[in-house]
Amino acid sequence: MEFKEFKMDINGTPLIIRHSLLAKQTNGSILAKLGDTEVLSISVMGTEDKFDKDCMPLTVDYEEKYYASGKLFGSRFVRRESRPTENAVLISRMIDRTVRPLFNPYLRREVQVNTTCLAFDEINDPDIVSMIASSLSLMISDIPWNGPIGAVRIGYKEEIGFVINPNYKQRDEGLMFEMTLAGVKNKINMIEFQGSEVMEYLIAKAFEIAQKVINDVCDFQEKIAKEIGVQKTSLNFVTIDDAFKKRVYEIMKEKQEQILFSNTLSKLEKQNEMALLFTSTKQQLVEEEFEDEKINTLTLIIEELTNDILHEQILNNDKRPDGRKLTEIRPLDVMIDVIGHNHGNALFVRGDTQTLSVVTLGSPLETLTMQGMEIVGEKRYMHHYNFPQWSVGEVGRSKGPGRREIGHGALAEKAILPMIPNKKDFPYTIRVVSEVLSSNGSSSMASTCSSCLSLMAAGVPIKEMVAGIAMGVIIDQNNESQYKVLTDIQGPEDHYGDMDFKVAGTKNGVNALQLDVKVNGIDKTLLEKALIQAKEARMFILEKMKSVISSPRSEISIYAPKIISFDVNPDKIGEIIGSGGKTINKIIELTETKIDIEEKTVYILGMDLEKVNQAKTIIENLIKEYQVGDIVEGTVDEIKDFGAIVYFDGNNSGLLHISEIDNRRINKVTDVIKLGDKLKLKVIRVENGKISLSLKALKEDK
């Protein structure tokens, strides 16, 4: 089989594209290789138009394969991949968010983009090459799509500056931030960012560097598509009759605008009013004898109408649906200790959006074990996000976390993770769960705020307080240089707006970003303006949070386990554990604690601090290396003809020879000492682990 090969260089790493008849029954397939990390991306389109659907039916998947990294994972009985890892889900989301805005929204053919990692070199991250390959499989196919898109990761370290596509080693050595971006020529339409208190000007500079790389990657793809691509299929898109659309606008626009911009109606009341307006409008159109084919497009026309009204009012009048100023934040309410009998909790309310976050503290060995093609290891801090249907007033069955829940949870986790104390200072495993109780926009950023507050309420000594805000933009589609940036977007501004830009961080800088758009993308100027407004909002929210709790509590909850940790000589660990675990199990039973040993560190966990300290004392005494002259207190456990065996400090024992009992001659040990006697003794000799004790030496010292 012949391959046609194309190559470009990205910061010293070759990007190689190969095209052949592999997966020849798909609409488009491509092999893409960055370094030695290689993916296969395919694009497939259905054969039927699904005009009964009210949105473009697009499915985007990224799949990890264990064989790609030469690993045999799974259980003893099932050696195969199962459900996608969180990392695979997050990469799927990135590809989806990048390619989706470039499809015609009136396309009703099912389209699937699937990218599979075939080889992973453990140097180059598969996410960048997967986004590029997904773009190319669409570009060379007959599927109508307005690409290409390029993708790049930008890292930054003070000592070396900006790094294009940093490899795993560079990332593990400690970057101030890493930022994954994708977009079309001269615009960015997707960002994922994680860092630690990064100044906004550095983010803008990274954006600028990334755009140049993305432009080059797009040029590269256009040349490939020109050489091997096929003609795009001519499809039947959803068509809207202009006269029918005009009539709908005449009937609905004024009433729709009144409902959308009402300051007295709640979100649910607006939804009910709009539903009634839809029903009455449809009935009127039926009475006016419009064809069913046209009436079936009513929902799409109403979407366009609402979009037009929102854009018109904000662009021309700075008027938002709830009457706020463009930079104004909805009313805030903050509470801690909302519920009892847990380790820490907090409620954060922003307008109609409410999130409740609850902290659970656990043992250092209760970390999450991660086992995937790309990521293997343990996670000590976890943030989980739940979004039930009832939080938006809808009926629906709970099916567990989906892509949205995983993505929002990961975003809040990235925002707070840099502020979590290290394991040595705070050895707990930490899990935070954010329950969305009510949602009207920006629930992920609300969960970031409530999670931070709950950690502080739980006594977790986070380094700085973290808050988040969602920014939006309304762009004039006839003149893209004209736009209005919105602070704290809610439902309609999110749904009909052109950008969802989530920014989270501390008073000192940004920790996490996430950008999605419904247009082709945004430029650096818009990004900088949004970052400035987001910083102002973040500072305002932080002050509100500080008015409720200004610093982490000095003590953890009475309901949380108490942990102490200390280092021991690794050679002594065997003595702590004992034969078959006999010694450590005896200590656990005696003190009602849990004891974990990791390398040279001992962790003792229990609900009673006094018993935790008791276990520590027993262990310290057990492995204590005694010196001549040490004073010990023990109990006579055995009596021999030549002396007594005295047990002290837990399991330690020593010999009190008959000659060391007193200065006078003693014929029988039992003349002076009885079983069970408690004695204070002096260590006079330590040889080969055996300890000799003296009672008379202690008397002589007096």
Image (cartoon, rainbow, N blue to C red):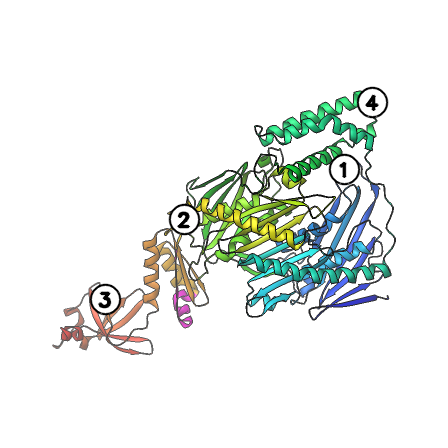
Label 1 SS: loop
- Residues tagged 4 and 2 counted as in contact (Cβ below 8 A): no
Residue type of the residue flagged with mark 3: Glu
The residue carrying mark 2 is 550
Marks 2/3: CA distance? 48 Å
The residue carrying mark 3 is 633
Position of 84 with respect to 105 (left or right) is: left
Which of the pair 608/515 is nearer the observer? 515
Label 4 SS: loop
Marks 1/2: CA distance? 50 Å
Which of the pair 592/423 is nearer the observer? 423
Query: Which quadrant: the C terminus?
Result: bottom left
The residue carrying mark 4 is 289
Query: Where are the magenta residues, as a range?
Result: 563-579
Q: Residue at x 69, y 63 (%)?
A: 67
Nearest-to-viewer mark from 1 and 4: 4
Question: In the image, residue 591 lies at what x, y percent?
Answer: 35, 55
Q: Residue at x 67, y 56 (%)?
A: 81
Whether residue 187 is visible, yes or no, is yes
Nearest-to-viewer mark from 2 and 3: 2
Label 2 SS: loop
Marks 4/2: CA distance? 65 Å
Position of 648 with respect to 524 (left or right) is: left
The residue carrying mark 1 is 53
Instruction: Please tell me in which quadrant of the rendered image residue 225 appears.
Output: bottom right
Q: Would you say residue 361 sits in the magenta stretch?
A: no
Residue type of the residue flagged with mark 4: Glu
Q: Residues within 10 Å of mark 1 (few under 14, many from 20)?
A: few
Tag 4 or tag 1, which sits nearer the N-term? 1
Residue type of the residue flagged with mark 2: Ser
Query: Which quadrant: the N terminus?
Result: bottom right
- Residues tagged 3 and 4 counted as in contact (Cβ below 8 A): no
